[in-house]
Every structure is written in structure tokens, then in C-alpha cells.
């Protein structure tokens, strides 16, 4: 199996949403009904129109087997450093535990490095213990508390 | 005292960097020497050129008394929701503990709400216990673990 990574196109949306929904937290908050609700399509176009923000798919031939979103954020802190941020990483259920997620994230880290980022950050819900082990294994340090306010 | 909030301009940079440096973690990683190192100026221009990213100052007349960066991030998760993200919030030392930080953050939350965000998120270093109480008081829930990888 040769997995490739590329920017998502609109036709990939149903497969991406299906990956987001195939998750213990995602199952409650996503809607995989066809045709997709318009808010997914709107969000896709908003992402495509936003600087430094990329929606990526991992593909095995024609099949979409993974997705993630990552962005590069310039900031004044740390003498004007850029930071990478990884969000919404998913790998197809039948491919989990085979190193595909690790390879996918290592690719994203390399994109951040090539773009000159000083660090890469992400947040993971406190209940995702297996994910926390995954991030630690990749060298990420759980140095911060992630706060959310629902509006 | 009437504090106003506005987008930062390049002439504000020395005052903003001084605020970032007047902090237990910031003291080690910022450089307030005049003239400012070019990386701060480069970062200012990168921020100004980035969609949905704003560097804000709180001003009391001519004096800059606070700063924060916030961005609005579109995403596919949660049916294509937007999320606000707050970073690098600082209030001048002599004005801390007087409700100015709370008012500043409430203003930012309102900007996120007006922009249609489903939530606002931030990360805070695990050592910042007083800051954690501040965020909880504003309704933020410490539901996530924040991971960082330095490159």
C-alpha cells in the first residue's frame, strides 16, 4: 500500500465527513446523510479561501483513508515565531494501528518545519487516552491545558 | 479610565513586545532591545496579511495597556463550524486584578460570537495556575490537553 497526501477537493467531502463521524466523539456531532448539509460545503470553501490553512487527505489510490487540517499561525510571541497547528486527524478504522497515522502526522510536522515554524501544537480531548499516547510517542509534550467555551 | 480596543499598528510593536516580555514565561523568550529584532516586524506584517487573524491592543488614551491575538478558524468538524482562538493575552502589570483582562477577553468572545463561531479555544501552560482560574471564571472548561512539539 502506497499512501499519498494531497489537498482535499470538494468531491472528497463525503469521505472526509464519514471519517470525522467514525469516532467516539465525532459520531455525536457529525451528519453523514447524503447530500451533505450545506454547512460542510460552506466550511470547505472557507478553508480553501483561508491563508495558511490546509485540509489534507491521505489516499490509497482512489480511496480516502485519512484526513487532517493544519494551519500555520504567525505570532509576535517568542520573537515573532510561526507555529503549526494540527486538527481533526482521522485514519480509516481498518488501517488504524499500522503506523499510517504516525506517518501522516510526521508528514505534517515536516510541512511545518519547511515553513519555518518554531513548534507544532494541537489539543486533544482529555478522554482520548490512546490518542495522548500516540502524540507522546511522536515527541509531543502535554505541557498545556486546553480550554474551550461553547457559544 | 476608559479602555478601548483596536487593531495594532506597527508603531505599537515596542509596547506590545514589552507586555509580552513582562511575564514569567515571556521574560525568557522575548527580546525588548531597541530597535526591535526584525523578526517581530516580519511577524507583524505576516499577521496583518493573514485572513481572520487579528493582533489587538487595549489602549488607555495613548498608552497601550493590553494585547492579544485572536483568530477565527473554519473547519469541517461539528458540521462545518468556525472556532475562535485566543492567544498571547497580556495586561499591563499595574492594571492586573482590576477586571481589565476579563473585559478584554469578553470583548474578544463577543467578536467570535458575532463572526458565527461555535466555540472559543485557547491553551495555557500548565504552570499558569492563576490564569487557569481566570479562564474558568469566564466560563472556559479545561476539557483538553494541549500538546506541543518544538522544532
Image (spheres, coloured by chain):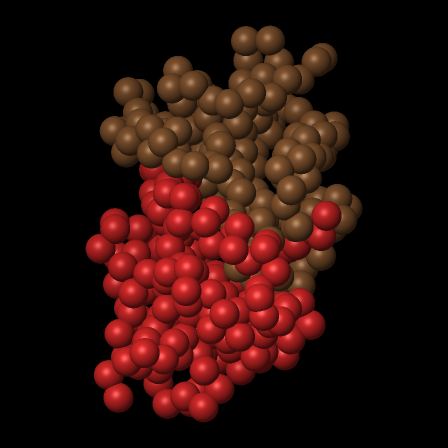
Chain colours: A red, B brown
| Above or below for B100 versus B71 | above
Query: Where's residue B119, x and y in %?
Result: 66, 50
Front residue (pair B23, B76): B76
| Above or below for A76 versus B12 | below
| Above or below for B93 versus B59 | below
Query: Where's residue B107, x and y in %?
Result: 68, 31
Which residue occupies 62% across, 71% down?
A33
Front residue (pair A44, A97): A44
Quadrant (top left, top right, bottom left, bottom right) of the N terminus of chain B: top right
The single residue placed furthest to the front in the displayed view is A35
Looking at the image, can residue B140 be seen?
no
Front residue (pair A43, B43): A43
Which residue occupies 71% across, 52% down?
A150
How many numbered marks are there? 0
Looking at the image, can residue A113 be seen?
yes
Quadrant (top left, top right, bottom left, bottom right) of the C terminus of chain B: bottom left
Query: Where's residue A10, x and y in %?
Result: 42, 60
Which residue occupies 28% across, 20% down?
B35
Query: Where's residue B45, x and y in %?
Result: 33, 28
Quarter of the image for residue A97 reads bottom left
Which residue occupies 63% across, 45% down?
B117
The single residue placed furthest to the top in the displayed view is B61
Amino acid at each position: 500500500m502506497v499512501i499519498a497526501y494531497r489537498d482535499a477537493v470538494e468531491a472528497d467531502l463525503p469521505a472526509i465527513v464519514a471519517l470525522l463521524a467514525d469516532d467516539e466523539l465525532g459520531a455525536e456531532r457529525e451528519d453523514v446523510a447524503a447530500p451533505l448539509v450545506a454547512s460542510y460545503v460552506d466550511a470547505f470553501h472557507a478553508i480553501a479561501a483561508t491563508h495558511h490553512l490546509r485540509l489534507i487527505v491521505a489516499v490509497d489510490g482512489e480511496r480516502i483513508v485519512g484526513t487532517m487540517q493544519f494551519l500555520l499561525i504567525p505570532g509576535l510571541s517568542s520573537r515573532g515565531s510561526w507555529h503549526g497547528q494540527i486538527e481533526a486527524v482521522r485514519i480509516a478504522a481498518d488501517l488504524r494501528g499500522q503506523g499510517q497515522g504516525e506517518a501522516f502526522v510526521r508528514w505534517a510536522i515536516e510541512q511545518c518545519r519547511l515553513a519555518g515554524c518554531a513548534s507544532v501544537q494541537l489539543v486533544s480531548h482529555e478522554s482520548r487516552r490512546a490518542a495522548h499516547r500516540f502524540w507522546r510517542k511522536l515527541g509531543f509534550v502535554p505541557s498545556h491545558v486546553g480550554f474551550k467555551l461553547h457559544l
